[in-house]
Amino acid sequence: MSKVVGLKIGTALLALWGVASLIFFLFTVLPGDPAQMMLDQNEDSKQLEVIKAKFGFDLPISTQYFNYINDLLPISIHSKNPTDFGFYDQEVYGGLILVEMTHWSIVVKAPYFRTSYQKRGKPITEIIKETLPNTALLALSSMSIAVLLGISLGIVATLNKNNWIDRFLQLFSTLGMSIPSFFSAILFSWFFGYVLYDFTGLNMTGSLYELDDLGEGLQLQWKNLILPSFVLGIRPLAVIIQLLRSNLLEVLSEDYIRTAYAKGLSRYKVILKHALKNSLNPVITAISGWFASLLAGSIFVEYIFGWKGLGKEIVEALNQLDIPVVMGAVLTIAFFFIIINIVVDLIYAYLDPRIKTL
């Protein structure tokens, strides 16, 4: 058991290191100078040198990479010289000094994502705390819609195999999987938020909290969650319908299902009490993958609907070359993706005792 736990933790840490390394080198070699972006039209050579020294842009790539990984590690090494980049400032890094040496200190701390280049040095952790809940709420509501409707419609398609209801649901699934989310977002926003506004009362754009009419405070606007949730939920909904239908039909041909029918159970009870549970493993796989993907895939949907989440923040950061925001957001998404996969292993064990997990 301990070996399996160690292997899973080791694999997760290795995956996070790989993601951190990939995005570091990817954005380091991108065209454009973040220092010039920060100075905008007020650029001069002296200010440029100061900015590069402050953020470590003038250091070799290998040194920048070491400093970046060092900031992310929970146990890190920092210089005691205030003029060095990466000097340990407790107000910045937090944490506690574990070991103190002549020129270096070993510190235990939370991962440090640094600060925004554009938002006056605002810590990335604060930006993530402000935007991640909105993205998580959007992803959770989208997946809830997809799961509830997908399982229900998958059962309906199975019960009506090869008739017009089944064919309609298969057509809907095919269209749902083939239409890009950004196109659906534009279509839904225009049709339900503009053409049918008098009937729906839904806005074309808007976030969870909006300024009131007087501009003096924030109001909770749950209706702004409806359109982006349905748009993000269309593709996983289509996948769940197809997967559940095909797996239910396969399970219904098993011998133990025939035995259940022979005992006098109705088709409704056979599906719900026997066939459905054994058909859910591939569906759980799809749900886990799609839920993690929704955290990343919500980028363009959030931007189109004006939903103030992590995805919209990434788009704005890319436009401004605010690299720390992009890096912090991607690492956060990767972390949750790994956690979701571990949780799915536990769900597998519950649904199918033959699968061994932790």
Image (spheres, rainbow, N blue to C red):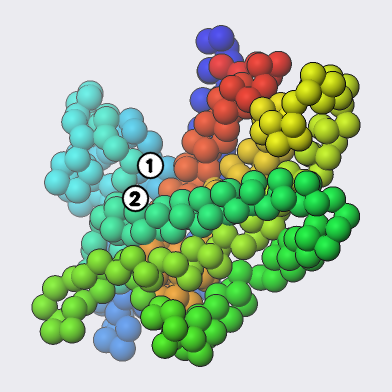
Q: Mark 1 touching mark 2, by CB under 8 A?
A: yes
Q: Residue 275's quadrant in the figure? A: top right
C-alpha gap between disc 1 and disc 2 = 7 Å
Tell me the residue at 14%/46% (across/down). 91
Name the residue rendered at 23%, 43% in the picture: 93
Where residue 72 is drawn, which disc sits there? Answer: 1
Question: Which residue is identified by label 2?
Answer: 113
In the image, residue 218 above or below residue 294: below
Q: Residue at x 44, y 67 (%)?
A: 226
Nearest to the observer: residue 138 or residue 69? 138
The kind of residue on which mark 1 rests is Leu
**Residue 308: horizontal and vertical position, in percent?**
36, 68
The residue that appears at 31% across and 63% down in the rendered structure is 116
Q: Classify 331 as above or below 209.
A: above
The residue tagged with tag 1: helix, strand or loop?
helix
Res. 18 in view: no
Does residue 259 appear to the left or right of 179 in the view shown? right
